[in-house]
Image (cartoon, rainbow, N blue to C red):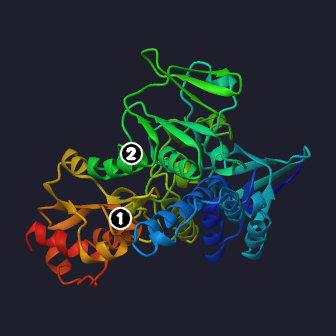
């Protein structure tokens, strides 16, 4: 057994979140080791955010051209699937993490490859592919940034089949003739549209509705677009069993009905990837483990932290990177005796925005962009809230597309007269979201927000229309 090497911070998981923890810790004067069992850069870089958006973008651009007279007439062909897939692959560096690894080392981070096990208090053992073991002891913190893994439903027959998860769906080398998507959440719907636009015949099977975490008016715009493009959507439909018939998958969806497809994508959510790294042996229940706003695990002895998807709070890459920066700052401050057990909300050490202003975008076409809380959530929390909503029908939208269709909503705390939630749905509305995020984080009073004049003619003019409809 090797001797322990001592370092200030041990980070398990070298995805974007783990990278940010380690680099920020080094910037704050601490030493850090970053441990990765697969590719440096993690799920987002190779099998999620980047390749999925690269698959979606060409179709959105083509559809945008077809939405404007003059450009529409110049479009004579369809997507070149081979080129779309090649461009997707370029964003993953052909699943080669050399450049990411070089960046980590250049940032002053010690990079270790292998499977990490938390083998004791502040102790981590790394098992290499060659059977070697390397051991580290942390002076200040062990940070779990191991991301998430797919949640696979107990569908009869599924476990014995070679179905797709999002990994296979974002890295496939060929367009299947047909694809059945089990799940109506963001990942399933995005990939359904991407593969449909590349030429696959796509059916979405959703146990309840489509994009149910968003306001109904927004999700219905996406559903209408998908159906118009030939995607079959089955809502309130369970998948009872899956079997193979020759080379095809056959899904039993109840009442004697079936769906047949060349490939099946199971996109029914994800859960923290924290099992099997030694936490159970130390007495932690990974299903109920919780952490505070600095990322420090409650009851974890003060040395154990979780960030990103592994923390289980807001499973979004950008929000995980935000948590990572704050967590690293908190660890550094505690190492110097500058921070106690708790951190004040909105301080440099507390991830307050997780519960107040976490922005998210569904990159379908049309897009859905949402930040803050919905009207239902606000009222459930006891907030005296109102909503103002309207169709996006401004000059900028008319210029952007001849048949532009969109919808926008603001949720207002009536006692404080500030925005606590916003949703935009329509082509390219993601670029509207940061202004709403700033308004919520800054708690900008509506009467002051009235003086933020949107440029004419842009889609941002919808802000003026929303405030006018509210009554300003």
Residue 468's quadrant in the figure? bottom left
The local secondary structure at tag 2 comes to loop
Q: Nearer the viewer, mark 1 or mark 2?
A: 2
Using residue 429 as the reference point, say whether residue 6 is left or right of it. Answer: right
The local secondary structure at tag 1 comes to loop
On residue 381, the disc is none
Where is residue 239 shown, x and y percent of the image?
Answer: 49, 24
Where is residue 416 shown, x and y percent of the image?
Answer: 15, 66
161 or 4: nearer the viewer = 161
279 or 203: nearer the viewer = 203
430 or 257: nearer the viewer = 257
Q: Is residue 322 visible?
A: no
Residue 20's quadrant in the figure? bottom right
- Residue at left offset 63%, top offset 40%: 177
Q: Is residue 2 visible?
A: yes
The alpha-carbon separation of the residues under discs 1 and 2 comes to: 31 Å
Within 10 Å of the Cα at label 2, are there few (<14), some (14-19), or many (20+) other Cα atoms? many
Using residue 132 as the reference point, say whether residue 330 is left or right of it. Answer: left
Q: Is residue 284 above or below residue 215?
A: above
On residue 345, the disc is 1
Residue labelled with disc 2: 211
Where is residue 325 shown, x and y percent of the image?
Answer: 54, 68
Label whose residue precedes the other's in the sequence (1 or 2):
2
Within 10 Å of the Cα at label 1, are there few (<14), some (14-19), or many (20+) other Cα atoms? few
- Residue at left offset 11%, top offset 62%: 415
Q: Is residue 54 above or below residue 216?
A: below
């Amino acid at each position: 057994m090797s001797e322990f090497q001592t370092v200030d911070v041990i980070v398990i998981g070298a995805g974007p979140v783990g990278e940010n923890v380690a680099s920020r810790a080094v910037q704050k004067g601490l030493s850090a080791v970053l441990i990765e069992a697969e590719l440096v850069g993690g799920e987002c870089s190779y099998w999620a955010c980047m390749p999925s958006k690269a698959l979606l973008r060409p179709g959105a651009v083509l559809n945008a051209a077809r939405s404007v007279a003059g450009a529409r007439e110049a479009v004579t062909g369809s997507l070149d699937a081979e080129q779309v897939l090649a461009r997707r692959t370029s964003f993953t560096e052909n699943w080669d993490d050399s450049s990411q690894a070089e960046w980590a080392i250049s940032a002053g981070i010690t990079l270790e490859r292998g499977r990490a096990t938390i083998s004791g208090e502040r102790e981590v053992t790394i098992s290499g592919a060659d059977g070697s073991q390397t051991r580290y002891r942390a002076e200040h913190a062990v940070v779990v940034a191991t991301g998430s893994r797919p949640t696979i439903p107990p569908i009869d027959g599924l476990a014995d089949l070679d179905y797709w998860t999002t990994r296979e769906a974002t890295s496939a080398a060929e367009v299947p003739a047909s694809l059945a998507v089990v799940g109506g959440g963001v990942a399933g719907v995005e990939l359904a549209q991407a593969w449909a636009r590349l030429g696959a015949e796509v059916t979405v099977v959703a146990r309840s509705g489509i994009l149910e975490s968003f306001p109904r008016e927004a999700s219905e715009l996406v559903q209408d677009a998908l159906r118009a493009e030939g995607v079959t959507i089955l809502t309130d439909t369970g998948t009872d069993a899956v079997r193979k018939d020759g080379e095809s998958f056959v899904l039993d969806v109840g009442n004697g009905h079936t769906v047949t497809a060349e490939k099946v994508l199971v996109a029914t959510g994800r859960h923290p990837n924290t099992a099997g790294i030694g936490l159970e042996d130390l007495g932690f229940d990974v299903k109920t483990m919780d952490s505070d706003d600095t990322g420090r695990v409650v009851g974890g002895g003060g040395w154990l932290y979780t960030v990103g998807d592994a923390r289980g709070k807001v499973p979004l890459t950008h929000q995980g990177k935000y948590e990572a920066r704050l967590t690293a700052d908190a660890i550094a401050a505690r190492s110097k005796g500058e921070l106690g057990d708790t951190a004040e909300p909105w301080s440099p050490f507390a991830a307050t925005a997780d519960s107040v202003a976490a922005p998210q975008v569904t990159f379908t076409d049309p897009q859905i962009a949402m930040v803050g809380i919905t009207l239902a959530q606000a009222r459930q929390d006891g907030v005296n809230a109102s909503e103002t909503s309207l169709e996006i029908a401004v000059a900028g939208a008319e210029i952007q597309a001849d048949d532009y269709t969109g919808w926008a909503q603001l949720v207002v705390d009536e006692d404080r007269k500030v925005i606590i939630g916003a949703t935009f749905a329509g082509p390219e509305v993601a670029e509207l979201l940061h202004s709403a995020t700033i308004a919520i984080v800054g708690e900008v009073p509506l009467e002051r927000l009235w003086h933020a004049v949107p440029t004419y003619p842009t889609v941002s003019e919808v802000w003026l229309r929303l405030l006018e409809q509210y009554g300003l």
